[in-house]
């Protein structure tokens, strides 16, 4: 039997027997000190997962991401998670599918459409999201109050949108909150160097409405 606790965790997470997981090794993910790639063979086939250790002060993703993954395939598949008691020194963690080799998506419109898909998947789940620790508010909450409160990613950039075989998948949800979805659009437009007004209109069409010049001005004033 595989006596390695990580190997046993990987096996349980995949619904496999411990002997089915062999040649297990870990390696750092470049540029991501919070992540380790776990490589192994599953019944002889090469496979990998990513173990992400979360900040004890910001454990939201350990609660939120499994919930989102049950609702939509626009987020990473979660294999396992750990949420230690508040008094424990251990950090929360999640074990997710390995998207580190999938390229970032350079198409802001495709990223916005993936974002809308996530919003729609949890549109009726605001009470559940709040129970998981998702806060309400965010920058410019008053100025954008005419917009419906949706699940805002909080740090949506191209490197947090991976182009996979099933489409665009949005990662890193630890800054999520309930608020105006245009906030994500503004951050993404700044990251991609694309026209904010045009990208905001693309987002607004999903809600069959337009974006006012005043709202665009508010978004630009955020300085992203």
Image (spheres, helix red, strand yellow):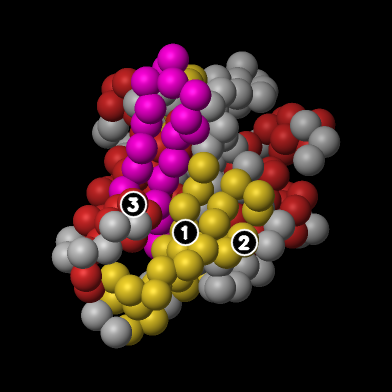
Residue 198 can be seen, yes or no:
no
* Residue 20 to residue 138: above or below: below
State the residue position of label 1.
50
Q: Which residue is mark 3?
A: 5
**How far apart in space, not on screen, are marks 1 and 3 (Cα)?**
16 Å
Q: CA distance from mark 1 to mark 2?
A: 9 Å
Establish if 183 lies above or below 145.
Answer: below
Q: Quick check: can you spot residue 65?
A: yes
Judging depth in this view, the residue of 60 and 27 nearest the camera is 27
Q: Residue at x 54, y 73 (%)?
A: 102
Q: Position of residue 12 (x, y in %)?
A: 22, 56
Residue 128 in which image quadrant: top left
Q: Which residue is under mark 2?
A: 29
Numbered disc 1: secondary structure: strand
What residue lies at 47% left-to-right and 59% top-to-bottom?
50
Please name the residue shown 66% across and 69% down the image. 106
User: Nearer the observer, disc 1 or disc 3?
Assistant: 3
Dot 2: within a 10 Å radius of its alpha carbon, few (fewer than 14), some, or many (20 or more) residues? some
Q: In the rendered structure, which disc, 1 or 3, sits on the residue that comes first in sequence?
A: 3
The residue lying at 27 percent from left, 63 percent from top is 2
For the residues labelled 1 and 2, say whether their Cβ atoms are less than 8 Å apart.
yes
| Residue closest to the far bottom | 44
Label located before the other in sequence (1 or 2): 2
Disc 3 residue crowd, few under 14, some 14–19, many 20+, Cα 10 Å: few
Sooner in the amino-acid sequence: mark 3 or mark 2: 3
Residue 69: image tag: none
**Distance CA(mark 3)–CA(mark 2):** 21 Å
The magenta region covers 78-98
Magenta region includes residue 83: yes
């Amino acid at each position: 039997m595989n006596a390695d606790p990580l190997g046993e965790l990987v096996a349980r997470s995949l619904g496999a027997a411990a002997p089915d997981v062999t040649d297990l090794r870990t390696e750092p993910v470049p540029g991501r000190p919070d992540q380790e790639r776990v490589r192994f063979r599953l019944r002889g086939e090469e496979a990998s997962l990513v173990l992400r250790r979360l900040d004890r002060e910001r454990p939201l993703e350990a609660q939120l991401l499994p919930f989102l993954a049950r609702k939509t395939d626009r987020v990473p598949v979660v294999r396992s998670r750990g949420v230690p008691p508040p008094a424990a020194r251990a950090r929360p963690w999640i074990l997710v599918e390995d998207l580190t080799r999938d390229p970032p998506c350079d198409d802001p419109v495709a990223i916005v459409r993936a974002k809308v898909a996530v919003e729609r998947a949890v549109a009726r789940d605001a009470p559940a999201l709040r129970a998981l620790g998702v806060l309400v508010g965010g920058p410019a909450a008053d100025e954008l109050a005419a917009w419906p409160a949706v699940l805002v990613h909080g740090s949506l950039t191209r490197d947090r949108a991976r182009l996979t075989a099933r489409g665009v998948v949005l990662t890193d949800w630890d800054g999520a909150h309930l608020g105006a979805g245009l906030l994500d659009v503004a951050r993404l437009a700044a990251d991609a160097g694309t026209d904010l007004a045009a990208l905001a209109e693309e987002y607004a069409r999903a809600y069959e409405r337009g974006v006012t010049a005043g709202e665009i001005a508010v978004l630009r004033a955020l300085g992203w």
